[in-house]
Structure formats: structure tokens, C-alpha cells
Image (tube, rainbow, N blue to C red):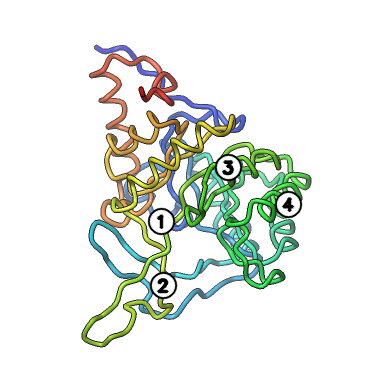
Amino acid sequence: MGIKRDMTVDIAGLKLKNPVMTASGTFGYGLEFEPFFDIGELGAVVVKGLSLKPKAGNPPPRIVETPAGMLNAIGLQNVGIDVFLEEKLPKLKQSKATVLVNFFGNTADEYEELARKLDGVEGVHGLEVNISCPNVKAGGIVFGTDPTVAHNLIKKIREKISLPLIVKLSPNVTDIKVMAKAVEEAGADAISLINTLTGMAIDVRKRKSKLANMTGGLSGPAIRPVAVRMVWEAAKAVKVPIIGIGGMVTAEDALEFIIAGASAVQVGTANFINPSAAIDVVKGIEVFMEEEKIEKITDLIGSIGN
């Protein structure tokens, strides 16, 4: 019988049983996947992004397949913070999963109010803030594309909460290192990246966008090389843990991110293809560690050579 491999990682003070999470927006509220496997066996479950009020999202069509990927313009549809706390979280707590709540707003005040409502709630172990949203009070500039705006927002949220704070970065920037440093200095405990790349698909017969919203977020294996590169850059620029996201389907994909410098990973679009994708990645990493005689997953973090 082989040696028991140590899969535990520490993210912002949270000791996770393994480095595999689910990516927000691809795993519902976690409960939808309970028929397929024990979600408590994952490192953490990151729930669908929450807003102050319920959000209907964009009109269809709002998902389209692309080569090795998917464009989505769901529009952050969700039940709202109150329904989540009253109806979803009590059931989620029964799973014994480590729960990270993703949230977003259109103003700094909305972000702060959401953070306050979530802080100290039993069953919520950490927060992941999505800053890839337009600031309606600043002419629509996206919070996550301006380092000063992002820094100020995260600083305000950090002052209001005691829970671990993970900041999810947009890849639609000139230099990911600048954004990573800005949110680290503002008090982020960890950084997750990347969110989707902005993309577009056109129906050449109809000469119109395949999405009602014109553009959408590109995810899936097509973006993985970009995501791995950004994780590698960000990991060299900051001291806080990095959580890698972007097109991973297999354990080997996830290991690319870890070797590039990620302390944990999030499985996203793969969940649409295979509901057990995240737990399959966990098992695959264990097999890899056994084969390579690696005792601790932490030995692999940032182990890339020149």
C-alpha cells in the first residue's frame, strides 16, 4: 500500500483538504451536484456570484460553444443574497463542504453591504469578490481594470470584514501583475485568476452576434495557456496565495497551474461537460503524486524551472 499523500493547502488561513475548488458560476450553489458525488470531498465549493437583489441575467441566447471553449453572457443571474442565506446555505452546511461565497456589486456601497451581510455567517468560510463589474457611479469603468479603483474598493471591503478575502481578477487588463499588487496592498488574503476573456461569435448567415448581448465571457480549454501565464506572472509579483482558474479539465491541467505558482485551482467549464470533473481532478492529482513519489502537494507549488 502506498504512502498517504498530503493534499492539504492553506489559503488565507483556511486549511483545505485538497487544492481543488469549483469556479463560481459553473457549479450552481453546490447543491445541484450532490447527486453526482460528495461535494464535501472538494477543497472548497465556490457558489454562484451573489448580488444584493435577485438578478434575472441577460436574455437568450446567452451561451454559445466555440472551438475548445464556450462564450457565456448569462449576466450573473442569481437568487440574491437573502434567498441564498435563507434557503441555500442551510442545505449547503449539511454537506460539510468548505464554502466560499462569490459576490459582486455595481457600486462600492453595494460591495460593502454584501460583505457586511456575509461576514460572520455560520457556514460561510470565506469570500471571493468579483471585481469584473462596471462601476455605475464612474461611467461604467470596470472595477477590475483600474488598479487605483480596485485598490480602493478592496480596502473598503477589507475594513468591514474578518473573513478571508479572495479577490478574483479580470484578465482583460494590460498587466496582471499591476492588478495583483494593487489588491494585495489593499488587503486581499488571496487572489483568484483568471475570470473569463471577453469574446464574440458571429452567425455569418444572419450577420449578427450569436449572443443576444453581443459579447460574452470566453472560458474552457481555449483560454488555459493565457490563464497559466497570468498565474505564473502574478505568483512572482505577490506574496499572497494564488488560485488558478481557466480551462482545466484534467488533473494534468490543474498541475500546470500549481507548478506555475498556484496554491489551489478552480474547475469551471469542465463541470458542464462532466458533473464529476472537480472530484476527478482531485483523484488524478493523488495518482500523479503517487507516481512521482511526491509526499506533499505544497512541494509542487511554484516548482517550475527556468
Mark 3 residue type: Ala
Q: Mark 1 to mark 2: distance in Å?
A: 19 Å
Q: Mark 1 to mark 3: distance in Å?
A: 24 Å
The residue that mark 3 highlights is 180
Mark 2 residue type: Thr
First in sequence: mark 4 vs mark 2? 4
Question: Measuring 24% from the left and 56% from the top, which residue is drawn there?
Answer: 68
Question: Residue 246, image x and y in percent?
Answer: 38, 48
Q: Which mark is residue 215?
A: 2
Residue 228 in which image quadrant:
top left
Q: Is residue 206 above or below residue 135?
A: below
The residue that mark 1 highlights is 26
Element carrying mark 2: loop
Name the front one of labels 1 and 4.
4
First in sequence: mark 1 vs mark 3? 1
Q: Nearer the viewer, residue 298 or 260?
A: 260
Q: Mark 2 to mark 3: distance in Å?
A: 25 Å
Name the front one of labels 1 and 2.
2
Check contact, mark 4 vs mark 3: CB within 8 A.
no
Local crowd at mark 2 within 10 Å, few (<14), some, or many (≥20)?
A: some
Question: Residue 250, image x and y in percent?
Answer: 27, 40
Q: Mark 1 to mark 4: distance in Å?
A: 29 Å
First in sequence: mark 1 vs mark 4? 1
The residue that mark 4 highlights is 152
Residue 65 located left or right of residue 161: left
Q: Is residue 207 above or below residue 295?
A: below
Residue 296 located left or right of residue 55: left
Mark 1 residue type: Thr
Q: Mark 4 to mark 2: distance in Å?
A: 28 Å
Residue 149 in which image quadrant:
bottom right
